[in-house]
Amino acid sequence: MLKERENRIDLIRGLSLLLIFVGHSNFVFSEGLQHSRGFADASELFVLLAGISASLAYYPRTGVYVFGSSGKPLLRAGKIYFVHVGMLLCLLGFFGIGMAGGLPLFADASTTLGLDGFWSNPLGGIGSIFLLRYMPGSFDILPMYVILIAFVPFFFHLHDRSRALLFGLSVAVWLGAGFGHVNLVNTALPEGRWYFDPLSWQLIFLIGLAVGIRIKTGRPALPYNRAIFLAAAAFCLLAVPVNILFHFHFVEPPSEWLYRAMTTKTNDGILRLVNAVAIVYVLWNIDAFKRMANGALLQPICVIGRHSMPVFVTGLLLSDLMTVTMALVRSLTVAEQVLLMMAGLLLQLVLGQYLEARKTSAIRSAPLVAETATNHASLSRING
């Protein structure tokens, strides 16, 4: 049975959070960094690990899920929903006040972030925000999690009855969404659809869910197999130069349409999905990586992985700030952009340390509170 925290999950997730921030910040080196890791990027790793974490949090150690215990994942989905709505409304309110004050800086920034469509019909836009139909930029990431977490009880139920059926349906939905271009409405984007299509991204989430169930029930998460390990490692290594050559058009792919279909982010193309699973499999089976995850040096990154939701929200807002800065300020030198990046990374690491310290303090004070309550109860009985 699982008795202690698996720091490898936290380390990969923490690294993913930092990479997501850099990739979304629109620095001159953001795109190069994002595509220098192969076909997949940090988003796939983060969703895969979100599936693992969901199983560790909500799946019973007995190995049989009961629908009556579905309240926790639904509450979690509701919490993420209100975090998303609140964050977006605050952002729009902030820009609205600035624009009402006649500050051109806010109007230009609003255009940079793709918020202009909201101001033409604010009341309708607010309704669309609550209905998850208005999400500028990368703001449909959290809504994707809302949907995936809300369906966790159903996924568990189907998993316990037939994993083959669960993944058969999942692959069918993934293929249908990809080839049929089935997606949800997002009026904030020119394409009119979600950038992260949950109908496609559910497959990598389910893979993580299945891995997490193995961990929760005391089985090896990703058992080492020499042939699979070598194949996965070779794929990861080969994917880096191939993706760089094709993405930046140093070399044209044999079929541009097929390459785009296999690497689409909206539908989580097959090359991205396989690359993400291969990366996690390889890292998981490298002893040195496990020692690094359990060591002191990288604990700050593990800590932000343990507090992924507030750190992710902070990173998302910081990346929007960086994007606006890149678009509005005089041309910044690469050195200045590196300093901005380091400041953003440091803020997230500091936030993680603060949240961890607060959590540790709450855990330590809990026994004292319980003891005090017991003493008060005893005195009441004596005095009564």
Image (cartoon, helix red, strand yellow):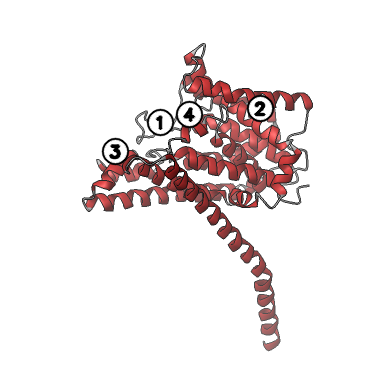
**CA neighbours of label 3 inside 10 A, class few (<14), some (14 to 19), many (20+):** some
Q: Does the image show residue 365?
A: yes
Front-most of residues 10 and 29 = 29
Q: Which mark is residue 290?
A: none
N-term-proximal mark, 2 vs 4: 2
Closer to viewer: mark 2 or mark 4: 4
The secondary element bearing badge 3 is classed as helix
Residue linked to disc 2: 165
Q: Amino acid at mark 4?
A: Thr
Q: Which residue is mark 1?
A: 193
Label 3 belongs to which residue?
117
Q: Position of residue 86 (x, y in %)?
A: 41, 51
Residue contact at pointers 4 and 1, CB within 8 angstroms: yes
Mark 1 and 3 residues: CB-CB less than 8 Å, in contact? no
Q: Is 90 positioned to the left or the right of 343 in the image? A: left
Please say if 236 is above or below 66.
Answer: above
* Label 4, residues with CA under 10 Å away: few <14, some 14-19, many ≥20: many
Nearer the camera: disc 1 or disc 2: 1
Point out the tag, 1 or 2, that comes first from the N-terminus: 2
* Residue 181 image point, x, y percent: 45, 23
Residue sitting nearer the eye, 202 or 10: 10
Between discs 2 and 3, the one toward the N terminus: 3
Amino acid carrying label 3: it is Gly
